[in-house]
Amino acid sequence: MSTRIFNIVVLALALTACENRPDNGILAEAEQRAASRAGDDGRIECAINGASGFSRDCYTERLSGENGVTMIIRHPDGGFRRFNVLTDGRGLEAADGFDKANISIAEDGRILVSVGPDQYLLPARIKAEEETATAGSTSTTSEDPAQAGN
């Protein structure tokens, strides 16, 4: 009886091994998805407390509430900043504290957000001039930066 079970198991394993050859197209898609997720891991470049160089050490988190979307940027030292995500084309505004968020366009489809001694490079969608004229606002809006923790 045990040889019969053994033969069935061996036959099943042999058939499984023959039929589970990897599909190169599926593998390529999986690798592409993994690469895009690796770049979208919730980390952003930041320069905290007046640092002169940027490092990819800060994390973003987005929370939806009755007053809209709030983005929290967490610092490597445990500190954080909260921003309201604006839908009128201005991008972000500081959600608390007395420091105002200053936003400027940076390279590679990103914006530079400066608040007090802290600076953050965030992905952004830059509105076309005709969209800006129609909306009557400035030229940046926040795109969906990485959504760690949500």
Image (tube, rainbow, N blue to C red):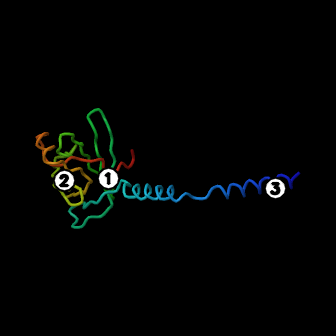
User: In the image, is 61 to the left or to the right of 10?
Assistant: left
Instruction: Pick whichever, 51 or 45, lies toward us.
Output: 45
Instruction: Report the residue at 33% width, 58% height from top.
Output: 76
What residue is rendered at 21% in x and 55% in y?
111
What amino acid is at disc 1?
Answer: Arg
What residue did someone put label 1 on?
Answer: 74
Q: Residue furthest bottom?
A: 53
User: Residue at the location (39% across, 44% down)?
Assistant: 150
**Towards the viewer: 9 or 67:** 9
Q: Which mark is residue 100?
A: none
- Where residue 6 sits, quadrant-wise, is bottom right
Read off the residue under disc 3: 7
Mark 2 or mark 1, earlier in chain: 1
Tell me residue 1's x, y (percent).
89, 51
* Residue at far top of view: 66
Q: Amino acid at mark 3?
A: Asn
Q: Which residue is mark 2?
A: 115
Task: Look at label 2 and name its amino acid.
Answer: Val
- The local secondary structure at tag 3 comes to helix
Element class at badge 2: strand
Mark nearest the camera among 2 and 3 is 3
Q: Position of residue 144 (x, y in %)?
A: 30, 47
Can you give x and y, in whole percent of width and height, for residue 91 in the image? 20, 46
Label 1 Cα crowd, 10 Å radius (few <14 / some 14-19 / many 20+):
some
Distance, label 2 to label 3, CA atoms, is 70 Å
Question: Mark 2 or mark 3: which comes first in sequence?
Answer: 3
